[in-house]
Image (tube, coloured by chain):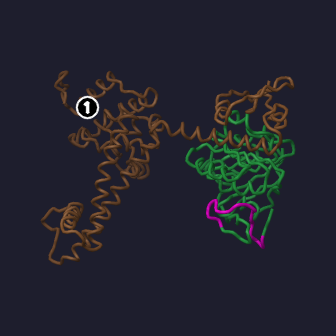
Amino acid sequence: MIRIGDVLVSKGEGGVYSERMLEGYRVWDPYRSKLAALYLVGKGIELSPDMKVLYLGAANGTTVSHVADYTEVVYAVEFAPRPMQDLLEVARRRKNVMPILADASCPEQYAMIVEEVDLLYQDVAQPDQAAIALRNCIFLKKGGHLVLMLKTRSVDIRKEPAEVFRDTLDILISAGLTIVESTWLAPYHLDHAAIICEK
Amino acid sequence: MQSCWFGDIDAGKCTPFTGDAAAYAYRVKESRISMDNFVPLDWGEAVTCGVCRDRAEYLAILQKVCIAGSEQGIRERYASGDIELLQMVRTLDEMDTVTNLLSERVADWYQIRHPSFSRKYRRTPAHVLVRSIAERSRERGGGGALNRVALEIAGLAEARTALAKEVSARACGVMPNTSALIGGLVAARLLSCAGGLKELSRLPGSAIQVLGARTALFAHIRTHAPAPKHGIIFQHRRVHNAPREVRGRVARVLAAKLAIAARIDYYRGHAEPAFLDDAQAKIDRAGGVPECDEGTRP
């Protein structure tokens, strides 16, 4: 990952969401992007130019644009039409972003498009987040990584965040994944955790 | 056999699919892939297939397909008309808030300009005052910022009237049965509160009855305050004109019929005269109005 001082940046065309530029690089704001927060709080997965990424919950393409700066191709899945309009604009300017309007819990909707990927990144606000991630692991190559951004409040508002965190880890481990790293994203994102697994 | 966006691969033999980006996107959308024993596609097959020469070209074509597919998908989602109706009715309600707020402010301002003027005993609501300021400044022309603002508010009020008509008309098209029971404008507000026609059609009658009375409902649940009898549906004359004692009953029966109407709207999409006649009669009966003979109904 490219850092200038303590600031996480990526190399690419700016102006996607009026992000700050620093020495010609795009500043990657940890308060806006959970992935950026992960790189500052924990270790994360080093992104490289030959990487293929399946990104679930692409939303407006803010984080997608930074991931695309680092990697070869990003398959960006988003369900809602309104943010998809923004994501399409990002795709028109970045040759390696593949926008897919589909439901991440139904991988068969995009099984004809997505190839085997090195990284599965998931940031969806769904109660069955872990199950959705596991269903998409068929696209992940052996030894590839799953980065799951756990929104504990979206999983179950009545449970303690720590409890949701433990439950999710259990689900992932019992599905045969190895946990590489797991961390809370405080102070950047409250009650959000990042879990990295290896297939 | 493995199906990919660029063609079908059977026992090492690839049959390419030909067409433009939209055709590829349509093929992906219509495909029914089984996820048992699924193996992700290998992009190299596309080269064997003759669809592209190298990785760069593969990604370029695939991106065109993805963009075409997503654009088409967005168009289809928006086509039902209820999504635009949602925005229209929210704009309408926000315009009301804004014009009221501005009118009150301008009225206050006007009083400072005219120290002898008072609204007491005149029963002049702010918007009437604003309208008269606007008319006067239109006749005389010119005027300061106050007149300009009053003119703008008057213009906004006109736009609001036009929008209200459009909302009504659109609601009658998108939700004919619900609109027939409660009027286009109120039907559209119900839709906006529920978040869409699909969402509204999935609500039970009891929820539709108190839609828009969230504060009162939660006060009831938390502190055992009296339960709200009606939310948005109070805006319909049948509820607010009903005598106080039967208002709750009218609201309940109306809401129950609205729930059915919303489902007919969502799943059939056209008016059902048989259902509507029956529902109107039942609601009238709930309000204590004796059923009138066919033909004399207003």
Image height check: is A196 above or below B180?
A: below
Residue A17 included in the magenta stretch of the image: yes
Callout 1, which amino acid?
A: Ala
Mark 1 Cα shell of 10 Å, populated few (<14), some (14-19), many (≥20): many
Q: Position of residue A167 (x, y in %)?
A: 72, 47
- Direction from residue B175 to residue A39 in the image, left or right: right
Q: Determine the image quadrant of residue B116.
A: bottom left
Q: Is residue B149 left or right of residue A36?
A: left
Looking at the rendering, in which quadrant would you find the N terminus of chain B? top right
Secondary structure character of the magenta stretch overall: loop
Looking at the image, which residue is at 83% across and 55% down?
A: A48
Chain B drawing hue: brown
Can you give x and y, in whole percent of width and height, for residue B75 in the image? 54, 39
Q: Which residue does the image show at 57% across and 44% down from the upper left?
A: A81
Question: Where is B86 relative to B178, above or below?
Answer: below
Along the viewing direction, whichever of B196 and B202 lies nearer the viewer: B196
> Compared to A22, does B274 lie above or below?
above
Task: Tell me which corner region of the image, top left, top right, bottom left or bottom right, holds residue B67.
Answer: top right
Q: Which corner quadrant of the image does residue A133 belong to?
A: top right
Which quarter of the image is occupied by the C terminus of chain B? top left
> Residue under circle 1?
B286
- Give SS at disc 1: helix
Q: Which chain is green?
A: A
Q: In the rendered structure, the residue with mark 1 lies on which chain?
A: B
**Magenta range:** A4-19
